[in-house]
Image (cartoon, rainbow, N blue to C red):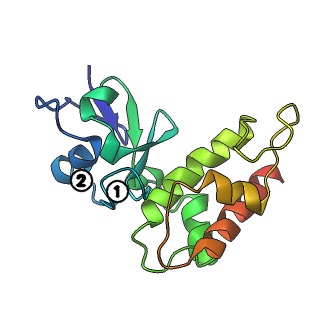
Amino acid sequence: MAIRINGTDIEPPEDARVSLLDLVRERRHLTGTKVGCNQGACGACTVLIDGERALSCLTLAVQVDGRSVTTIEGLGSDGLNPLQAAFLEHDGFQCGYCTPGQICAATAMLAELEAGLPSYITHDLAAPATLSREEVRERMSGNLCRCGAHNGIVDAIMAVAAERAA
């Protein structure tokens, strides 16, 4: 099988110890995915695996054999996607280091919300999931921003969600 990264099939590494993070950054030169804590605590390395968010530092490349991986480069391959544009418009980044992981996580988070998946703070599990600033904060809690751009990030995600709902 092959690993599809941003639409390109590649052979999985022979060394089963190679992380997905190292595969995309070091071997595929897709440096948009950042190395943060390298322990799964900060979310800077978040990518999409078959559309679901995943921490690439905690995922072995061989685990995604036969699956599709999307990095920040893949999200913006046809120009800025709506979340990237919204992050720019709403000052959703400062240093920008966490931004690729934030945008990948937000992409999956909005899909989770559209699928009606509840979060930890969803009060009524029988009702359709609704978006609020608190929901966005909870659903994005695995991605840390040390610069304090949280309000801009939430504003950007809320704006894209509102556009999709309109």
Work out whether 116 lies above or below 154. Answer: above
Q: Position of residue 21 (x, y in %)?
A: 28, 48
Q: Secondary structure at mark 2?
A: helix
Disc 2 crowd, CA 10 A, few/some/many (<14, 14-19, 20+): some
Q: Which residue is mark 2?
A: 25
Q: Which mark is residue 156?
A: none
Task: Kindly identify the amino acid type of the residue bearing the numbered disc 2.
Answer: Arg
Q: Position of residue 165 (x, y in %)?
A: 81, 51
Q: Position of residue 135 (x, y in %)?
A: 73, 54
Position of residue 44 in the picture relative to residue 129 (left or right)? left
Of callouts 1 and 2, which one flags the residue occurring earlier in the amino acid sequence? 2
Task: Kindly identify the amino acid type of the residue bearing the numbered disc 1.
Answer: Thr
Residue 18, quarter of picture: top left
User: Where the N terminus falls, by quadrant?
Assistant: top left
Residue 49, quarter of picture: top left
Q: Are marks 1 and 2 in contact (CB under 8 Å)?
A: yes
Residue 55, quarter of picture: top left
Q: Which residue is mark 1?
A: 33
State the residue at coordinates (27%, 35%): 60
Q: Nearer the viewer, residue 38 or 67?
A: 38
Q: Secondary structure at mark 1?
A: loop
User: Residues under labels 1 and 2: Cα distance?
Assistant: 7 Å
Position of residue 36 in the picture relative to residue 82 (left or right)? left
Q: Position of residue 44 (x, y in %)?
A: 40, 59
Work out whether 75 lies above or below 11. Answer: below
Position of residue 157 in the picture relative to residue 149 (left or right)? right
Position of residue 137 in the picture relative to residue 16 (left or right)? right
Q: Nearer the viewer, residue 107 or 136?
A: 136
